[in-house]
């Protein structure tokens, strides 16, 4: 499988300071997360120093990013490609590493002026669970961001990506609806894509019920979720329902060739590497032929008429070329595109704003782009 030039991926798990992790623990009840305002402590990010030299796969890695990667490696988990999906979901995540780094260095949690609540909505095949993040500003109505987490369509959950959803809600002043789409291999392609579209369609029809503005909705996602955000916008266009105001795709899966420059350069990078990509492919797709499906290979899709799109990429990431390729294809299709690459950081850096300066910048950049699309 490693030699296959087809992939599908999304990230290992992600994020900073999520409410819980996926180490075999049941995802925290949404009611327990009703108040996500956190306290702040001493900001010690400047004191973060790696224990060892930069890894061979990332000579230019930023020190704060390396500290997170070193902590993740310290858990000694088996590589995900050697595990079943059920086992892989019990591994430590980058979220765990960030939270432990914060504890060890007395770094205070960021303050999110946001309330959360869980909700089940109708999906393509049964209910879909979503977590709704609402700014505590008592506005009459809010823009809405439908957000899709990463994890290669196989691992991770709402908790692992809680930091991203919280940050987007707090920094944009928008409601964020984070979608717990079905995971593979229990639910193969196109289950995640079906759930992603069903959730977006439900939000367009029910935004007002949660104080959302039904005319001001955006799509956002990371890694596998970045793929879902773009694919959902395409489906909305083709189904002739309301298009989102904007798309935010953070290091999205956008094509199926594992021989791109960034796959070659970052084949052994962490937390996402080439073998893991092949593992995601095996678990999500029914056959390798599906890798050419335009919902997977977005660069082969008809991209005309899509809304303004923001693409964020990381330098030390097999998916860097994917993000750059889809940005160019979108531009060629006449779509307004704004993109930014962050040097010295890896896949999954977005959402780590509490410890990684580049992540904080990326969160601010993403929020500014979405606010501009919302006319705020």
Image: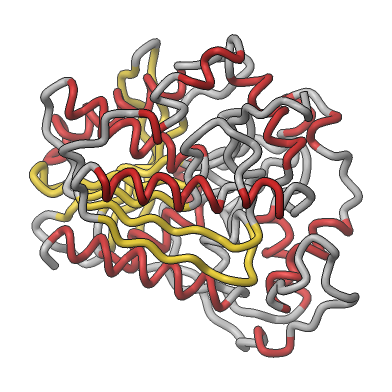
Q: Give the color scheme: rainbow, by chain, secondary structure or one colour.
A: secondary structure
Position of residue 143 measured from the top left corner of the image (x, y, whole percent): 18, 53
Give the image quarter of residue 329.
top left
Look at the image and tell me in which quarter the N terminus lies.
Answer: top right
**Foreground: 323 or 169?**
323
**Foreground: 357 or 206?**
357
Left-right relation of 295 to 49: left
**Foreground: 118 or 3?**
3
Position of residue 160 measured from the top left corner of the image (x, y, whole percent): 59, 47
The residue at the point 86 percent across, 30 percent down is 82
Vertical order, 172 against 39 (above or below): above
Left-right relation of 245 to 366: left
The residue at the point 88 percent across, 77 percent down is 51
The residue at the point 84 percent across, 66 percent down is 55
Position of residue 170 measured from the top left corner of the image (x, y, whole percent): 34, 65
Position of residue 83 measured from the top left corner of the image (x, y, whole percent): 82, 28
The residue at the point 31 percent across, 19 percent down is 122
Numbered circles on residues, count: 0
Give the image quarter of residue 115.
bottom left
Look at the image and tell me in which quarter the C terminus lies.
Answer: bottom left
């Amino acid at each position: 499988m490693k030699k296959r030039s087809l992939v599908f991926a999304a990230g290992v798990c992600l994020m900073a300071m999520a409410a819980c992790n996926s180490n075999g623990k049941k995802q925290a009840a949404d009611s327990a997360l009703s108040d996500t305002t956190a306290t702040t402590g001493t900001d010690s990010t400047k004191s973060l120093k790696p224990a060892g030299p930069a890894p061979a796969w990332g000579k230019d890695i930023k020190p704060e990013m390396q500290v997170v990667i070193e902590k993740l490696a310290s858990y000694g988990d088996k590589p995900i490609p050697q595990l079943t999906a059920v086992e892989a979901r019990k591994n430590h995540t980058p979220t765990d590493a960030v939270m432990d780094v914060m504890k060890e260095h007395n770094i205070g949690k960021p303050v999110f002026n946001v309330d959360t609540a869980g909700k089940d909505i109708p999906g393509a095949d049964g209910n879909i669970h979503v977590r709704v993040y609402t700014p505590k500003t008592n506005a009459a109505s809010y823009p809405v961001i439908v957000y899709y987490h990463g994890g290669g369509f196989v691992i991770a959950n709402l908790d692992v990506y809680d930091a991203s959803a919280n940050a987007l809600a707090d920094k944009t002043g928008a409601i964020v609806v984070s979608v717990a789409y079905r995971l593979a291999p229990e639910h193969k392609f196109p289950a995640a894509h079906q759930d992603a579209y069903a959730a977006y369609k439900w939000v367009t029809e029910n935004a007002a019920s949660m104080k959302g503005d039904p005319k001001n909705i955006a799509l956002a996602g990371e890694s596998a979720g970045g793929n879902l955000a773009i694919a959902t916008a395409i489906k909305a266009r083709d189904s002739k329902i309301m298009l989102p105001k904007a798309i935010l795709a953070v290091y999205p899966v956008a094509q199926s060739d594992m021989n791109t420059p960034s796959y070659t350069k970052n084949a052994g990078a962490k937390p996402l590497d080439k073998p893991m990509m092949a593992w995601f492919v095996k678990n999500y797709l029914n056959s390798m032929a599906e890798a050419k499906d335009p919902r997977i290979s977005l660069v082969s899709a008809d991209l005309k008429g899509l809304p303004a799109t923001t693409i964020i990429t990381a330098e030390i990431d097999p998916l860097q070329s994917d993000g750059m390729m889809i940005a160019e294809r979108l531009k060629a299709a006449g779509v307004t595109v704004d993109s930014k690459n962050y040097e010295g950081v890896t896949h999954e850096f977005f959402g780590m704003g509490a410890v990684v300066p580049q992540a904080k910048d990326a969160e601010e950049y993403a929020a500014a782009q979405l606010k501009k699309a919302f006319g705020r």
